[in-house]
Structure formats: structure tokens, C-alpha cells
Amino acid sequence: MFQISFFIFIFLLGSIPFGLLISRYWLKIDIRQQGSGNIGMTNVMRVGGKLPGIMTFLLDFGKGSLAVLLAQTAFPVSETSPQAQLLFLSLAGIVVVCGHVFSVFLRFKGGKGISTLFGVLAVLHFSIGLSAALVWAGMFLWKKISSLSAITMLIVLPWLFILIPWLQNETPVWTMFFLFLLLSSLLIFKHRENIQRLLKGQEGQLSSNKKD
């Protein structure tokens, strides 16, 4: 019963639409009616400027990290095996990302989950999180397109759960691979409109339309 209540709380945590709150109370607009209509960092930055965009990223990142930290407290390794704890932490991370994507406060609509996912990975497995961030950054430096960077990172991410442990002389946890394969597939699906624009050569580069 505790675990069910915990995951409900984590889902609600993920559902907090920080991008919408920042746009409404800081920028005095509804970000859902501006730009791409997305509540994430990229759209907030394009519409409102760098500072609101960065704040959106930090808050979305923070709720991802907080979810895994709370899971570590709720399910300490001293009470179970390391693999069981890792599974619990992974599920908490996936639930908080799903909360962001299907926010209960927005009638189960939401963002695309990338900032929150990075927050999860930073605590869950720092080496994998750093590697994923480098993949994102490398693609972004090349093409300057945030959605393409995110999609590339999502394609690579599940395989990092095999590659990084292998490079560290550890045994890969295949459950993690399949869990994050499912999550990555969901988030890529959330980018389907971006993919259509990419194929047509119509996806814009990340830039701010407002000077801070």
C-alpha cells in the first residue's frame, strides 16, 4: 500500500507544470498558446527568453532528481538487494517522467519529458546521465536543433545501460535496458510532430525571440 501511495505522489510531483506556471506568473502569458504550444524549456526559452527557459529546465530537472532521491529514502538498500532498489528507483524515475508527460493538472497532457529525464539520470546513474547529456550536446552543437538532439539521445539511451556498465566492468541490468527502451519509445512518440517537421526540413533551431 505504501508503494502505491508513493508512486501516486511521484506521479503528482512529475505533473507539476513548471513551464506553464513560469509563463503564467512571470511572463503573463499561457505558453500553451504561444510558439509550439509545449510547456517545456525549449518553447519557454523561444517565447520568453533565456532566463525563464533556464528556470523551467532547472525546475523540471529538479523534480526528476527529487523523485529518485525520495525513492532512495523510501526504499533503502539496507532493506533489500541492490538490484531490487535499482529497479524501484528506476520505476520512480519513469513514473515522474510520465507525470510530466501526462500531467493530471493539464488533463493528462504535458511536456516531452527531456529535462525531467535528465534529472532522473543524474541521480539514478550519473555516468549514464552524463553520457546521455554529451550525446544531446554533441548533436546540438552540430545542428542547433533541440528536438533532434533529444531524439538522438533517446535512441542511444537504452544502449547506454548496457555499454556503460560493460565499460566499468559491471554486469548490465537488462531490466533497466528494457524499461528505458519503453520510456525512450514513449518520449520519441511525443516528438512525432517534431519528427514530421524534421523530415520536411521545417524544424527551427533553438533561439530566443526575446532579449533578456
Image (tube, rainbow, N blue to C red):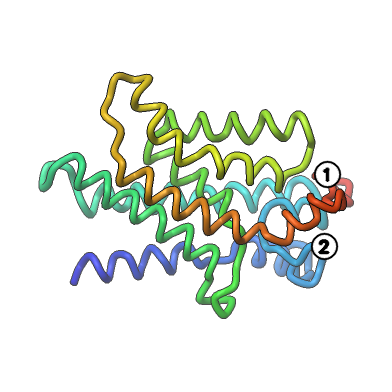
Give, as a three-letter code, the residue at label 2.
Gly
**Picture quadrant of residue 193:** bottom right
Above or below 168: residue 179: below
> Looking at the rendered structure, which numbered label has been put on residue 56?
none
Above or below 141: residue 90: below
Image coordinates of residue 169 in percent, x first then y, are 29, 19
* Residue on which the image places disc 2: 35
Task: Tell whether 124 sits left or right of 212.
Answer: left
Image coordinates of residue 92 in percent, x first then y, are 35, 56
Q: How crowded is mark 2: few (under 14 residues within 10 Å), some or many (20 or more)?
A: few
Residue at 10% x, 47% y is 79
Residue at 89% x, 51% y is 209
* Residue on which the image places disc 1: 205
For marks 1 and 2, give the one nearer the viewer.
1
Q: Which residue lies furthest to the bottom in this view?
A: 107
As helix, strand or loop, the secondary structure at mark 2 comes to loop
Residue at 56% x, 42% y is 155
Q: Which residue lies furthest to the left in this view?
A: 79
Task: Tell whether 51 sits left or right of 157.
Answer: right
Residue at 19% x, 47% y is 84
